[in-house]
Image (cartoon, rainbow, N blue to C red):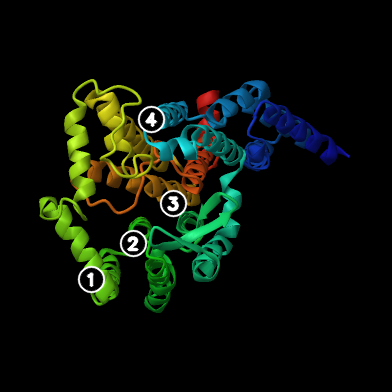
Amino acid sequence: MKQQQNHSRVEQFLEEVCERVRAKELHEEIKEELRAHLDELIEGNLSQGMSEEEAVKQAVVCMGEPDLIGKGLDKVHRPRTDWGMLAIIGLLSVIGILAMYSVQMSEAELTRMLNFFQNKIILTGIGLVFMTLLWALDYRKLKKYSESLFVFGIGILVLAPFIAEKINGATAWIMIGQTGLHIPTIAIMAMSIGLAGIKPAKEWGWKESIVQLVCRGVIPFVLLMKMNSLAFAAVYTAIFVAFLWITRRNVAQIMTFGAGFTGFIYFIVVGSDYYNYYVTMRLRNFLVPWNDPNGEGFMLQQARNAIHSGGWWGQGIGTPNRTIPYVQSEGMLPYFIYCFGWLAGIAVVMLILCFIGKAIETTYRTKDEFGKRLSFIIGMLLIVQFVWTVLMTFGYAPFVGLTIPFLSYGGTGQVLQFATIGLLLSIYRRRDTIPTSWMPNTINQIK
C-alpha cells in the first residue's frame, strides 16, 4: 500500500509535467527520463536513512515545480513552423501565378485555348492541400514504408512502356481524361523517400554495396533512359550520389562507386548510337549554339535574346514573345525576365538562393537521422531543378526538358513540388522533438 501511495505521488508529478508539453509523442519518453532521474534521487535519500515515503517526497520536491518544468520542456521541444520557408514558397507561387497570367494575356492562341492561368491556380490549390497534409503528418511514419515506396517507383518505371503514352518523344505520361500524370516525376519522388529510409552506405559490406549500387542506382537510371527521360535520369543520379555521400562508408568506397557508376552511364549513353548522337548534339549546341541557331541551338539563342531585350524593368505584363518556345515550361524564366525585367529576375534568383539556404538549415539542425537524410535528399530533388533551370536560362547549361519549380506550368510536377515542401515543413516542425540525452541538462536549465 505504501509502495502504491509513493508510486501515485510520482505518477501525479509526471502527469502534471506532461500536461504542459504539447508534443504528445514525447510524453512517454519524458516520463521514462524523469522516472530515471527520480530513482537516482530516491536511492540517494534512502541511503541517508530516510523512510521510503520521505525519500520519495523529498525527491519530488528536489525536482522542482512540475508546472515550471512542463512549461520549460514545452518551450524547448514545441513544434516549430518554418515561416521563412513558407514565405519563400508563397512568393515563388505568387510569382508563378503572375507569370502564367502574363502568358495567358499574350497573343498566342494556344495558351488561351489551354487556359494556363486558371489551371495554374487550380494546381496551386491542389498542391497546397498536399503540402498541408504532409506538413501535419509525422514524417517518421514513412520510414517503415521506405522499401515499399522504392519498389513502387521502380514498378511504375517498369510498367511505363505498357501503360504510358508518348508525348514530345518520351513515353512517360498516363493520361486520365485531359490530365496527364508524369511517371518519372512520381517515380523519382517515391524512390527518393525510399532511399532516405534504407540502411546507410557506411553499413554496407562490399557484396551488398554492389547489389545496392545496381538496384538503387543503375536500374532506375536505365529505366528512365529507356523512357527517353535523360533529364530525369540525371536528376535521380544526382540524388543517388548525394545519398551515397551523406551515408558514405569511406572516401575509397565513394570513389569506387563513382567510378563504376560513371563507367556504366558512359557505356549506356555513349555506347548507344541514339544517345551518343543525342548527347553529342545537345552538348555541341550548348557550347556553340550559333552553329545551329534554327535547330538544337534555337532555344538557347532565343532565351539570351529575350533576357537581353527585357532590360531592367521589362517589356510589361502580357507582352507577347513568340520566339521563345514553351514559354509556360522550359522558357518560363527567360519569358518572365523579358516581361518583368532584370530586377525581377534577380529577385527570383535571390528567392531560390534563400530556399537552398533554408533547405540546408533544416537538414543541418534535424537531430533524427532519418529526418536528416530525408531532408537532404528531397531538398536535393528541388535544388537540382532550381539550379539547372537557372543555369540553362543564362546559357551555362543545356536545355534538357527541366522546368523551374513553382513558376512553370505543370500538373504532376507542381503538385509533388508542394508535397516536397510539406515534408520539409514536417521535418522542421519536429526537429526539436527527438530526445537525445537532453533531459538532465534541460531540467537543470529550467531549475
Q: Secondary structure at mark 2?
A: helix
Q: Earlier along the polypeptide chain: callout 4 or callout 1?
A: 4
- On the image, the x and y values in percent for residue 323 come to 25, 40
The residue at 49%/58% (across/down) is 173
In the image, taking residue 304 as reference, residue 97 lies left or right, namely right
Residue at disc 3, secondary structure: helix
Residue 379 lies, in percent from the top left, at: 40, 45
The answer to which quarter of the image holds residue 403 is top left
User: Is residue 184 toward the left or the right of residue 126 in the image?
Assistant: left
Residue 394 in view, yes or no: no
Q: Decide which of 22, 138 is in the foreground and name it.
A: 138
User: In this figure, which residue is indicated by the disc labeled 2?
Assistant: 230
| Sequence-wise first label, 4 or 3 | 4
In the foreground, 401 or 23: 401
Q: Earlier in the sequence, mark 3 or mark 2?
A: 2
Q: CA distance from mark 2 to mark 1?
A: 12 Å
Element on which disc 1 rests: helix
Which residue in the protein does label 4 denote? Answer: 99
CB-based contact (under 8 Å), mark 4 and mark 3: no
Give the Cα separation between the discs numbered 4 and 1: 36 Å
Task: Quadrant for residue 350, please give it.
Answer: top left
* Dot 3 amino acid type: Arg
Going from N to C along the chain, the mark reached first, 4 or 2, is 4
Say the numbered circle drawn on residue 276.
1
| Three-letter amino acid code at the position of disc 1 | Asn
Q: Residue at x 23, y 73 (%)?
A: 270
Q: Nearer the viewer, mark 4 or mark 3?
A: 4
Contact (Cβ within 8 Å) of mark 4 with mark 2: no
